[in-house]
Every structure is written in C-alpha cells, then in structure tokens.
Amino acid sequence: SEQQRSLAEDFHFDHSGNLIKYSKVLYHPNSGPFLEETQEYDPANQSLTRREITGYSTGGKQTCIDTLTYNAAGEVTSRESIFFDENGNPIGSRNCAHS
C-alpha cells in the first residue's frame, strides 16, 4: 500500500502586503521532513531573489542543501550545493557561478 506524504506551507508578508518569503515542507509518511523549500522575494517587485531546497533522510538528517540566487530579471546568478553524510556532517559541495 502506498502511504501519503503531508505538506506544510508558510507565507510571510511585509507590512504593505507584499510576499517576502514562502516556505514549504514535505514530510515522509509517518516520519519527519523529506524536503524543505524556502523562497525569498524582493518586496518592491515580487521577483524571486533566493531559493533554497534541503533534502532529508527518513531519519531526519540533512542529506543536501541546494541554494540558488537570482538577479532582477529572474536569471540564476549563482548555485551552491552542499552534501551531508548519514550523521549530518558536510562531505562535499559545489559552486556554480553564472554570468
């Protein structure tokens, strides 16, 4: 039988009502987080400025973090990925700069 995952979402707004941060967490069935995504926005124009995705093992340990930053045109300007061992210790990373 296939188990269902659960999802939690949070929206953060500034005093003017502009979206400044969005986050969601997808959970393993009957367990802890599976995937967490956070997006940050420029309140002046609502463009996406940063996106971070964190993956977790079924035991709740971080397995990877992938972070992207964007320019005002919405193009990716940098990407960094960090990978973790089963104890949550960093074991490698990768940086990609875009021009």
Image (cartoon, rainbow, N blue to C red):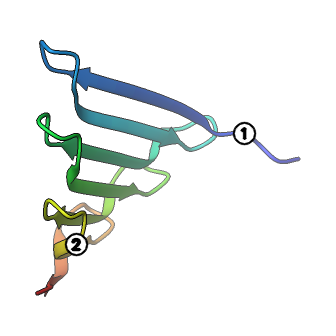
Is there a contact, CB below 8 Å, between mark 2 and mark 1? no
Question: On the picture, is 32 further left or further right than 81?
Answer: right
Mark 1: secondary structure: loop
Query: In the rendered view, would you say 28 is above or below 69?
Result: above
Q: What residue type is labelled 2?
A: Val
Neighbourhood count class around disc 1 (C-alpha, 10 Å): few under 14, some 14–19, many 20 upward = few
Q: Residue at x 29, y 45 (%)?
A: 38
Q: Position of residue 71 (x, y in %)?
A: 13, 64
User: Residue 76 versus residue 7: which sits nearer the camera?
Assistant: 76
Q: Which residue is drawn at 15% across and 85% down?
A: 98
User: Count the marks: how many?
Assistant: 2
Q: Position of residue 11 (x, y in %)?
A: 33, 25
User: Residue 90 versus residue 86: which sits nearer the camera?
Assistant: 90
Q: Residue at x 43, y 39 (%)?
A: 25
Would you name the residue on which mark 2 appears? 76
**Spatial separation of the CA atoms under disc 2 and disc 1:** 33 Å
Question: On the picture, is 35 further left or further right than 47?
Answer: right
Image depth: mark 2 or mark 1 in front: 2
Neighbourhood count class around disc 2 (C-alpha, 10 Å): few under 14, some 14–19, many 20 upward = some
Query: In the rendered view, would you say 12 is above or below 3?
Result: above
Q: Residue at x 47, y 28 (%)?
A: 8
Mark 2: secondary structure: strand
Query: In the rendered view, would you say 54 is above or below 89?
Result: above
User: Residue 47's mark?
Assistant: none
Q: What residue type is labelled 1?
A: Gln
Q: In which image quadrant can residue 45 be found? A: top left
Q: Where is residue 92 in the image (x, y as percent from the top left)?
A: 18, 82
Would you name the residue on which mark 1 appears? 4
